Amino acid sequence: DAGVIQSPRHEVTEMGQEVTLRCKPISGHNSLFWYRQTMMRGLELLIYFNNNVPIDDSGMPEDRFSAKMPNASFSTLKIQPSEPRDSAVYFCASSLIPLHLEQFFGPGTRLTVL
Amino acid sequence: DQQVKQNSPSLSVQEGRISILNCDYTNSMFDYFLWYKKYPAEGPTFLISISSIKDKNEDGRFTVFLNKSAKHLSLHIVPSQPGDSAVYFCAASTLIQGAQKLVFGQGTRLTINP
């Protein structure tokens, strides 16, 4: 059974470029979460969706960040324009609420902005 | 303002002995507390949880203890095995519109020495 799928696994880009990270949640899950992991701040929740609807985006750092979930099997996190301080590992997680307490994480996308 | 803190960035334990990982929190409104384990280049995986109304939960070699008056929880692993070497994240959750919103600590890197 496939877990959460994220692409790309690694992304290197230059400052000012647009970056799009992709996530396919576990089939049947109805909530999706985007996290960012940095050395300084650890794992932070950026945004989460219930049934494709954004519920809480208070963790999105700036207007340069945006996330969409056009359907139950796909989500994107976009950074435009990217900056070196955006360099981090970005995780996507999904869950089946209210059945699951825990969230199931993808392998992450390591983003490096030069 | 860090609501969940893991004050030990690393811990080294002899194989077969007990590993104790600690976590402190500030918000008394959290519903559940969870521990996740993370290997390099992988996403965090759920390990064990405890409800805020309990003080202990056990699952095989893993036991989580919750001290609400001290706003402190700990994860005990006994006996420790080399495969337990990983980064452990403590997380606290609040229920928001059906989904568990998780706040993570910074993580503790556990190394089990043969």
Image: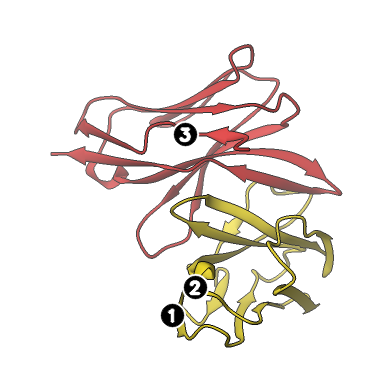
Chain colours: A yellow, B red
Contact check, label 1 and label 2, Cβ < 8 Å: yes
Residue at mark 3: chain: B
Q: Is residue B5 above or below residue B83?
A: above
Residue corresponding to mark 1: A114
Res. A51 in view = no
Quick one: SS at disc 1?
loop
In the image, is A11 to the left or to the right of A45? left
Residue ID for mark 2: A84
Amino acid residing under circle 1: Leu
* Mark carried by residue B6: 3
Rendered location of residue B53, percent (x, y): 70, 20
Image location (x, y in percent) of residue B35:
51, 39
Whichever of callouts 1 and 2 sits on the residue coming sooner in the sequence is 2
Q: For the residues marked 1 and 3, what is the alpha-carbon distance in whole angstroms?
A: 31 Å
Q: Assign a secondary structure to mark 3.
A: loop
Q: Is residue B16 above or below residue A114?
A: above
